[in-house]
Amino acid sequence: MKKFVALLLALLLCVLSLAGCGGASTPAEAVRLSFADATGIDAIRALDGKAVSIVGYMATLSPISGRYMYLMNMPYQSCPFCVPNTTQLANTMAVYAPDGKTFSFTDQAVRVTGRIQMGDFTDEFGYLYNYRIVDASCEEVDLATVSDNYALWQTIAADGVVAEINAMFDYLYFICQWTDYVFTMTNEDGSEEQVHMYPGDVERYLADDGPYGYADKRAEEYFPGLVARLKGISSTELDDLVAIVEDSKAVADYALAELSGGNYVYNSEEDRYTLNNSDELYNRWLGVYSRFSNWLAKWQL
């Protein structure tokens, strides 16, 4: 479970470098679908070949190529089809761009319009589904027209602070579970082998100010800066998210103290380190990350 979570978090770094939304032109008439309607598979089958539209958020776990994406009911989800997709829409729709066109990531809500296609599909991530939206267009939606509550999300997304908080949790997981990370080394004979991280490797990542390092997040002003950005958006309406960030700083402080205090042991047979308080560190990370996930659920469409 821990390694699965780490894989998802690592994938987020790749897709969040994209921005915008593209696709084909929107058909004049389309049947409107909704995740909240939980439309049955029979109703979807009746729409085979017809134009449909649905509003949602682009999943962070989507191909870098942009050839297709996962449209989900909540923002910043990285686990498509985690809700069983048997007789209901559940939480995910696979959406494919027309040939020669692509989608690019945006954290704003989007309306997808395209054509329902029934079949048996397996994509490059190994997900299986029996319907999808093809030849699709994608446009950002002004949620301010829905309610004042969603208007707040529009402002949050425009600032980009949620993307930064999402990246913060990747950093937090790294310092809490760095012994689970592996990287590939190439030997002199050209062969490759996977090796686990040493404490020195962790320190190098924490000091690296490049795109793959965490020097910016280890900086003393990082967490206060996130809080300031949130309060700049609203002095009161984001108190729950502010508390999550502040508690995340406490988790980071604890994890860094464990690292600097050498609270780990080396296993020479496996050539890897083990954290003495691995479960405690993981549970502290999971506690704040679960609260963040619940906060994201407030913006479900």
Image: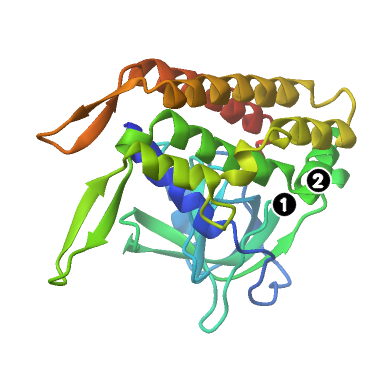
Question: In the displayed structure, does residue 101 sit left or right of residue 164?
Answer: left
Residue in the foreground of this view, choosing between 287 and 88: 287
Which element type, helix, strand or loop, lies under badge 1? loop
Side of 243 relative to 87 (left or right): right
Whether residue 81 is visible here, answered yes or no, is no
Q: Residue furthest left?
A: 269
Which amino acid type is shown beneath numbered disc 1?
Gln
The image position of residue 78, as x and y in percent, is: 49, 45
Label 1 CA crowd tier, 10 Å (few <14, some 14–19, many 20+): many
Question: Which percent across, then down, holds residue 187?
Answer: 18, 65
Q: Quarter holding the N terminus? A: top left
Cα separation, mark 2 vs mark 1, equals: 7 Å
Residue 288 in picture, x, y percent from top left:
56, 22
Q: Residues within 10 Å of mark 2 (few under 14, many from 20)?
A: some
Which numbered disc, 2 or 1, marks the residue that appears first in the sequence?
Answer: 1
Q: Residue at x 30, y 56 (%)?
A: 126
Mark 2 residue element: helix
Q: Which mark is residue 108?
A: 1
The residue shown at (9%, 34%) is 269
Residue 60, compared with residue 285, is above or below; it is below
Q: Position of residue 200 (x, y in %)?
A: 38, 41
> Tag on residue 154?
2
Residue 221 marker: none
Q: In the picture provided, is 269 more to the left or to the right than 161?
A: left
Q: Nearer the viewer, residue 223 or 288?
A: 223
Residue 146 figure quarter: top right
Q: Quadrant of the C terminus?
A: top right
| Residue drawn at the location 77% of the way across and 55% of the way down | 141
Going by the numbered disc 2, the residue's amino acid type is Gln
| Residue in the foreground of this view, choosing between 89 and 144 | 144
Q: Marks 1 and 2: in contact by CB < 8 Å?
A: yes
Q: Is residue 98 above or below residue 246?
A: below
